[in-house]
Image (tube, rainbow, N blue to C red):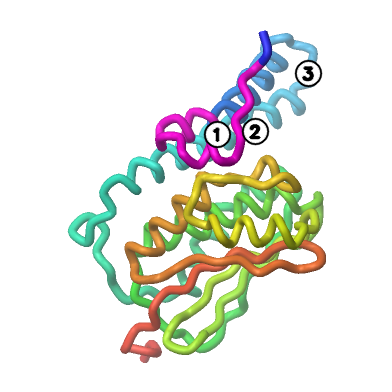
Amino acid sequence: MAQPQWSDKEFAAMPSIAVAAHELKAPLALIRQMSLLIEDGQLSPAEAQLMQRRVTLTAERSLALVQDLARTVNVQPTLFPLEPVNPLALLAQLAHQSRDMLRLYDRRVTWPRAGKKRLVVANPLLLGRIMMNFLDNAMRYSEAGAAIRVTVRQAGTMVRLGVRDFGPMMSLAEYRQLVDEMTMRKSVRTRPDSSGLGVYIAATFARAMGGQIGLIRHRDGLTFYVDVPLSEQMSLL
């Protein structure tokens, strides 16, 4: 029986729970496939161990997406209070958390070096999840061994945290579509496996912190970024 195909318009109009089900179908199918390979007993002990680790990481990423979706329903200041956050320290934590995943899939990330320690007004959990969603998208479209670049810079009264990948070039029409529909749950043709839901979640979290997300088109990839307010306490003493 043929699987149903949804247009972008239909996908954007779907309820969040249906979108989550659609995006979770691929990782769940992958988990099933890898589990069957392990059960088949044809893998060497080392291959089986590697496959089991991939099953675990895929399940963890899917669970995180579901948890993020649940948070978008009620992103209230009482539940996710804003506070001064050191973005460099936050990114150092993310570098540690993502180390196993990046090593397993042979991805390399260039993290920002220590510099002036500006503070931002944000919720550390929400800001961290935005960056992890961007990093996950970048990992899908960067070739094995290729660098993914994470940056932090001040832009007026905001601080911009970005994730630059070197994936497939996006046409100008697709770029404009993604910019125009940034807050919709979508992906585009040249990046069909990208998490449109992840971008939607990131946009929701950013608005809750008085910020916004955006993207920059390059000849050899994209930069997804989030702008969050600079704290009045501009530097750490």
Distance in Å between CA atoms under marks 2 and 1? 18 Å
Q: Quadrant of the N terminus?
A: top right
- Residue of label 2: 54
Q: What kind of element bears circle 2? A: helix
- Pointer 1 with pointer 3, Cβ within 8 A: no
Q: Earlier in the sequence, mark 1 or mark 3?
A: 1
Residue sitting at 32 percent across and 76 percent down?
Answer: 84
Which of the numbered marks, if any, corresponds to residue 10? none
Left or right, 165 with respect to 24, comes to right
What amino acid is at disc 3?
Leu
What amino acid is at disc 1?
Glu
Q: What kind of element bears circle 1? A: helix
Categorize mark 2 by other alpha carbons within 10 Å: few (<14), some (14-19), many (20+): some
Distance in Å between CA atoms under marks 2 and 3? 14 Å
Residue 110 visible in image: no
Q: Position of residue 219 (x, y in %)?
A: 81, 67
What amino acid is at disc 2?
Arg
Q: Quadrant of the C terminus?
A: bottom left
Q: Quadrant of residue 26?
A: top right
In the image, which residues are magenta? 3-23
Q: What kind of element bears circle 3? A: loop
- Residue of label 3: 43
Distance in Å between CA atoms under marks 1 and 3? 29 Å
Residue sitting at 34 percent across and 71 percent down?
Answer: 210
Residue sitting at 40 percent across and 35 percent down?
Answer: 15
Which of the numbered marks, if any, corresponds to residue 23? 1
Looking at the image, the residue that sits furthest to the left is 78
Residue 129 against residue 224 in the figure, above or below: above
Q: Position of residue 125 (x, y in %)?
A: 37, 58
Q: Position of residue 131 (x, y in %)?
A: 52, 60
Q: Magenta: predominant secondary structure element?
A: helix
